[in-house]
Amino acid sequence: MFVVEERVASDPANERFKQPTTDGLAVDTNPLDFYAAVTTINRLMKRDVVTGIGIVSPLGLSAPAHFEQLCAGVSGVSRIKSMNPDGFACHIGGEAPAYKISDYVPKSYRKATKVMARDIELAVIAADEAFKDAGLKSKAYVEKSEIDELRFGCNIGAGLISAELNELTHAMHAARDGNQIDLAKWGTEGMTQLTPLWLLKYLPNMLACHVTIIHGLMGPSNTITCADASSHLAIGEAFRTIQRGKATYAICGGAESRLNPMGLIRQQLLNRLTTTQNDAPASAVRPFDVAASGTVLGEGCGLLILEEYEHAKARGAKVYAELVGYAASQDTYSFTEPDPSGHSYAKAIDNALKDAGANVDDVDLLIPHGLGLASHDRAELEGLKKSFGQHLSKVAFAATKAQTGNLAAGSGVDAATAVMSIANGVIPPAINTTSVVDSVSLNVSTTSRKTSVKLAVTSTYSLGGQNAALVFRSM
């Protein structure tokens, strides 16, 4: 348990505090150095390693499939097939391959798939892979779970799940008064057209809910809905939970699908989607490139199983990498544009590296957010220049959304990709970043590169000002 004590001091300017302690150790520091003190304490805490990975993306239904296609330079962006996109300005997106959700849940749980929105299905599929990859036999696979369910956490970021319009049609028709919806009729007649469990398909916390029920997890659980930053924030929270000794393992990351009418119209109204590349989907998303014309939406899920290092070692688990740094920041610049100065975004990266006890010179791989929106990319570059300085031109730079589209809360795929890059010694390409905006020098390649990756950083931001960064290290 942490204990915070205040020391009485005659001179407030020199007042000092005894900071949180662990294992009988204390850090005595000036309040101005509080973050450095907490960082020191974090290194005395439990270590978190990645022992399982689950990915669903436009490039494949598994982590190996995704990473192989990513490194081969394959684009998962194509004309949207799940609906007719002709009524929208952007006809392309990054769709996950076809699947049967019943293949990924226990037979006894298949009825529950009726109340799973697509976002939930993506999380359930990725969780199934992550558990199997980690060699953890939960109650989904054996009659008596072989894991400590009370110490297994779950932190899954989610977006605002869009309702399926065909389910709302009858309800809205019943509540119609001329050309308008009568709210009184909606309550008395409209809602009766919906199934009693209808809402359970669209609550963001239902991703974590289904995963924890299927696998019998009863440790610390939370859902974060901070748009594109959700996955990294969720991973960071799980990281801290294990560090503090409140859990032994956690499944964490995020999932989202915006490939539906409501998701598309929101982004179209914000003028964020490319409207000129419908006939050239593979080259449509051009992160940090002078030819960037907008982003496209995608769908996916990236989940990691974090495990306390000594526990993982004791059971002989395969270890991909160690999560050594995390930080988040917030700004209030705008709900529709990122802060062009990149100040807050840079702070998240700076503090994540401090948390890891690392310098920018140590970083071998950077996976940025990189949406292919000119104003967004410039703002992100400003933040990256603040953090990395001259080293930005040296660190390998992999802008992966050119191949997947914007996975939003599913950007946990970027975190999982960073881990796989470390484990496989391969840096993914930046296939559509050929002429960097404003002549900024970046270490990009249109093909993958085989090289040792000892330290990787992945960073993200969301509209509304949330920023987060993660630092992974090879073992």
Image: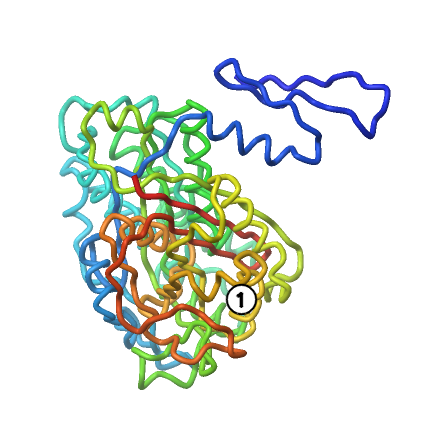
**Residue topped by disc 1:** 381
Q: Within the image, what quadrant is residue 95 found in?
A: bottom left
Q: Within the image, what quadrant is residue 442 found in?
A: bottom left
Residue 415: x percent and y percent? 36, 50
Residue 423: x percent and y percent? 25, 48
Q: Residue at x 23, y 58 (%)?
A: 67
Q: Residue at x 36, y 59 (%)?
A: 257
Way the structure is coloured: rainbow
Camera sees residue 428: yes
| Left or right: where 22 falls relative to 47 | right
> 262 or 334, which is in the foreground?
334
> 347 or 229, which is in the foreground?
347
Residue 139: x percent and y percent? 20, 28
Q: Amino acid at mark 1?
A: Leu
Is disc 1 surrounded by few (<14), some (14 to 19) or many (20+) residues within 10 Å? Answer: many
SS class, disc 1: helix
Residue 234: x percent and y percent? 44, 42
